[in-house]
Image (cartoon, rainbow, N blue to C red):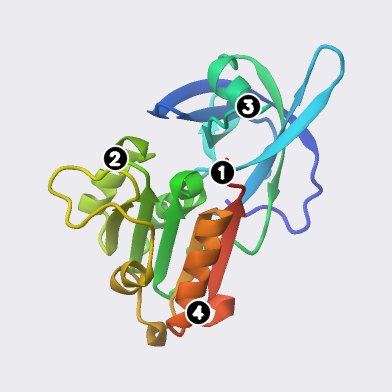
Amino acid sequence: MRPPARAPLTWRVARLVERRVETPTAHTLVLEVPDWPGHLPGQHLDVRLTAADGYQTARSYSLAGPVVDGPAGPRIELTVQRVPDGEVSPYLIDTYAEGDPVEVRGPVGGWFVWRPEETAPVLLVAGGSGIVPLMAMLRARRSAGSRVPFRLLYSVRTPDDVIYADELRRRARDDLGLDVAYLYTRRAPEGWRGEPHRIGLADVNNHGWPADLQPINYVCGPTGFVETVADLLVGLGHQPRRVKTERFGPTG
């Protein structure tokens, strides 16, 4: 669903209707949001919490998939990873219960998005929970029946840290034109070729598209990871304007 042009950003009251555990530290929250204006894959929203004494705090979270029609209004999905000593993510994962309200505002962002009418090959490079907006793109591709070739390179610490593990296995098997590759930085699964390592030139070169195909490259993850991958892609000849990045702090 495409949001209205220049739609004003207003706070809306959302309620939790479903929770899915993705990893020991990451949960997907399904929120029902009356009058949600729609969004594009890759956009995010702001979540605001208000304490009993009036103190407020807000954080931004990527939208994990398309809008779904629920019995009482539109539903959206967020995948939240717990941040140690954080103010918002521990509440959303450990305390926030079905039926509880939370304020949301969005959608936000217009650069780091993929539209189903795009025809260029796509490379997605995710670090940790940076997979969330990229999964929104994979889901939108499938929903639109697109045959645009996609490649995903997903870097995680260990196999236990793979968010959407079951769905990614299904998509790699069933979604024509999608290739999925993993990189492990601390512990690799049995039978995985190579040793755990941080992403480097060989990984991006082997799993990405040649620059002369003019793919669109989306990179999301911690700041250092994103800067490294973006520099590698530009060094391999990709035009900077075709390297789209979304980053968060090292504790994200």
* Residue hosting label 2: 159
Mark 4 or mark 2: whose residue is earlier in sequence: 2
Q: Separation of disc 1 and disc 3 at Cα?
A: 23 Å
Mark 3 or mark 4: whose residue is earlier in sequence: 3
SS for dot 4: helix
* Residue hosting label 3: 85
Residue 157's image quarter? top left
Locate residue 32, reporting x and y percent.
60, 27
Mark 3 or mark 2: whose residue is earlier in sequence: 3
Disc 3 packing (10 Å; few <14; some 14–19; many ≥20)? few
Mark 1 or mark 4: whose residue is earlier in sequence: 1
Q: Separation of disc 1 and disc 4 at Cα?
A: 27 Å
Q: Separation of disc 1 and disc 2 at Cα?
A: 23 Å
Contact? badges 4 and 2 (CB < 8 Å): no
* Residue hosting label 1: 63
Q: Is residue 147 visible?
A: no
Q: Residue furthest left?
A: 191
* Residue hosting label 4: 234
Disc 4 packing (10 Å; few <14; some 14–19; many ≥20)? some
**Nearer the camera: disc 3 or disc 2:** 3
